[in-house]
Image (tube, rainbow, N blue to C red):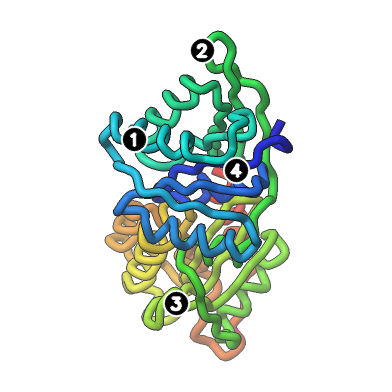
Amino acid sequence: MFENIQTLHCLIGEQQISNLIPIRHINPDQIVLWYTDRTQRRCESLEKAFKAENINCIAEKISPYDLRSIISDIEKHIAKSSQVDLNKIMFNITGGTKFMAIGSFLVCQKYNIPFCYLQSEGGKNYLYLYTWEDNTPILKETFQISSIINLDEYIKIHVGEYKRKDEHNYYEQLIISCIKDKVDEMISNIYLEEALEVDLIFRIGNRIGIAEIKTKNKATKKEGIDQLSTAGGREYFGTYTKKFLIVDREYPENNKDLAVVRDIKVIELKNSPGDTEDAKIDENDKELLVNTILEEMNA
């Protein structure tokens, strides 16, 4: 049925993945991006990315919470659209506010427009496709979606253009060597802004992780927590992104407690200090590093 969909309506929220995966899977000719004041920047990033691929994008501002206004604005857009065949329109009701989703659902119900919903859980993505029978939503198909995104587009739809630093310190290179063959894709040393660097960003399937690597004195400080909290906040990669702090020694308990609060997984490589001339990653530490990342990314 997806091959018949020409226009996909997307509700822009905090998590870009809620729209990126359905857009990639459905591959419409045109997308309508419904955004609010709070999500305008997210909308602009998506719009720029997909216009570069010659996908027609229409951005429409909408109320986040006024249900009557939401329904009215969507209906007005559909009425003025040149696309008469409503079977070639679909709504993705995953993103946005709950009221935006409810309003879209009610419009779909009124006009018998199909809709979809993306479930992202346990490292897996399921796209549910609904149609209508006698004014009742019917689950038509369910798709499990494997790898369909790439890191470059993921970064750009969250932060726009970014810079990379090609050189790594020796310990960073050791960490990269341990995990590069365990992930589908990895980019290192990216700058989201001049003063905000992320040591590693990697992908397993459609799940994204970011990591900071700290050694010596910095491995006992909260600097890495702060960097990850900022990079994984709503202004950048968002809460869907897994966050890892990799340190070359035991991490102080008070900082570990803070990491838990900020949803950051600390990986302590206690047998692999980075302050020796012949630094290397101990085999037990390597196993801990790899297994922790794989478990967290699939959780």
Q: CA distance from mark 3 to mark 4?
A: 29 Å
Which kind of residue does numbered mark 1 sit on?
Answer: Ile
Q: CA distance from mark 1 to mark 3?
A: 39 Å
Question: Measured from the top left, where is residue 262 in percent x and y?
Answer: 34, 55
- Inspect this view and state whether residue 39 appears: yes
Tag 3–tag 4 contact (CB < 8 Å) = no
State the SS at label 3. Answer: strand
Looking at this view, is 103 or 153 the one in front? 103
Relative to residue 113, is residue 234 depicted above or below?
below
**Disc 3 or disc 2, which is closer to the eye?**
2
Query: What residue does disc 2 label?
Result: 135
Q: CA distance from mark 3 to mark 2?
A: 51 Å
Question: Measured from the top left, where is residue 203 in percent x and y?
Answer: 62, 58
**At x 36% / y 37%, what residue is drawn?**
73
State the SS at label 4. Answer: helix
* First of labels 1, 2 by sequence position: 1
Which mark is on residue 22? 4
